[in-house]
Image: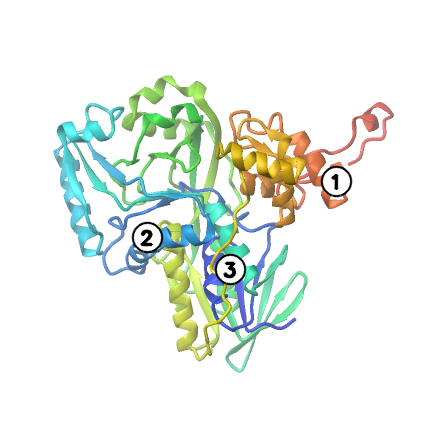
Amino acid sequence: MKTTVLIIGGGIAGTAIARELSKYDVDVTLVEKEKDIAFGGPTKANTAIIHAGYDDKPGTTAAKLCRRGNAKWGRLSSELSIPFRRIGSLVIAFNDDEISVLYELMKRGEANGVQDLRIIMGRELFEMEPNLNRKAAAGLYAPSAGVTSPYEAAIALAENARMNGVSFLLETEATGIIIKNGKVKAVQTNRGTIHTRYIINAAGLFADEVSAMAGIEEFKITPRKGEYVIYDKNLRSLVNHILFPIPSPISKGITVTPTVDGNLIAGPTAHDIEDKRDASTTFEGIEEVLRGACKLVPCLSARRDAIISSFSGLRPQPSTGDFIIKSYEEPYGFINVSGIKSPGLTSAPAIAEMVVEILRAEGLRLEMKSDFKPYRRPIEHPFRDFNPAKAEALIDQDRSYGHVVCRCEHVSEGEILEAIRRGATTLDGVKYRTRAGMGRCQGGFCTPHIIKILARELGIPVEDVTKKGGDSKVLLYRAKHLLIGDEKE
């Protein structure tokens, strides 16, 4: 196989770059080792915050791209039908020392070009957040901060990129890079060799390993684990803005955040680990999250019954402390897009534009397409959006929209079928596109039905349906095999 630009990694950075390059008349291919887009740890498991840009040190690449990226999310979400809301954020201080940190953050934000930052105290603070801890003394308000759905964003970017000619190869892992005479020539994968002129390394947690394949070992990625809890939607009204504590040297702290879907999410912790695949949760980690959440919103201490799920995500912490977005004289044609930690989600649209300019500087001819399609049609969610007229019209066209499969999130069979048509082949693939299984019962009722639909539509036995590809089978064998003593391994 041949391509001009090969992107390694199907997370938010890789898909944003793919979509940006799809605007130009150039052959682009993206490879992702997982079963689906956004299945890697950093993109699917984070706080989903679009940051304002006051936290990063002025002059860093992260600081520059965070502000630029934040400004692009309104248009991007509109074009691609990505859920996004600018709800604003508050960093909460509890004493004079912490108030001085707020002023430092505001000064830093202003240096980064963030507008409309202000310190709020007294009555106004509690009018904005009635359930905030009454010991809170002040808050740094950033109205440009927002929330989105990171995995839906990556999927939307990938769908639009595909519409505009980008090729996607899933379950395709880069295993080596071929370099001749100081230039990139090809990438070896588990499915064969792909010849290319340019390689963009957006491999997330494994970006240092891919970089080493090209002979570049100037940084190391350390996985930083963050654990979270998700609260039921009946607590959504408790919090109006993204609530941060005073940041620590290694983390923005444990937040309490309204999601675009109506839940509250609390977290993350921040602990460096060694295993890049360790997404386990721990009793100690969850307790740390709950302590941090209750410090900001004390009434949450009495609402453990409203916790519907917990999970952990791994952030790619680079040894440089900053995003690594650069090309190299040797090997020519290799571009690192590595160490994309927070605010990576916010920065993704700006990262993509920066990569395009690097490619242009490296000699790639980029001419805009006259037929670029900027818009992506979302999956219709008539019951979730509570639109009776839309639901009735869809049911008239297709009776499957009248069969509600996920009662918690009001997801119909029609939506699940549409998700499969768009590329979902696993339970998580359906979940990330429709939210089926993300409600209070966490798939307790709908999972068997979704398994049957996947098996039927994919033409495979129910035992071969997986949660996320690979060896994540949900059903190991049929009950009758137990009865006749013929269990499958």
Q: Residue lying at the far bottom in this picture: please name it.
A: 181
Mark 3 Cα-neighbour bin, 10 Å: few <14, some 14–19, many ≥20: many
Given the image, on which type of amino acid does mark 2 rest? Asn
Looking at marks 3 and 2 on the same chain, the residue that comes earlier in the sequence is marked by 2
Residue 436 visible:
no
Work out which quarter of the rendered image holds the C terminus and state it: top right
- Circles 3 and 1 in contact, beta carbons < 8 Å: no
Question: What is the CA distance from the residue labelled 3 to the residue labelled 2?
Answer: 29 Å
Q: Quick one: label 1 or label 2, which is nearer the N terminus?
A: 2
Residue at which label 2 appears: 70
Identify the residue under disc 3. 209
Where is 296 relative to 205, above or below? above
Asked which quadrant contains residue 84, the reply is top left
Q: Relative to 22, say whether 428 is above or below.
A: above
Residue tagged by mark 1? 456
Q: Is residue 249 left or right of residue 289?
A: left
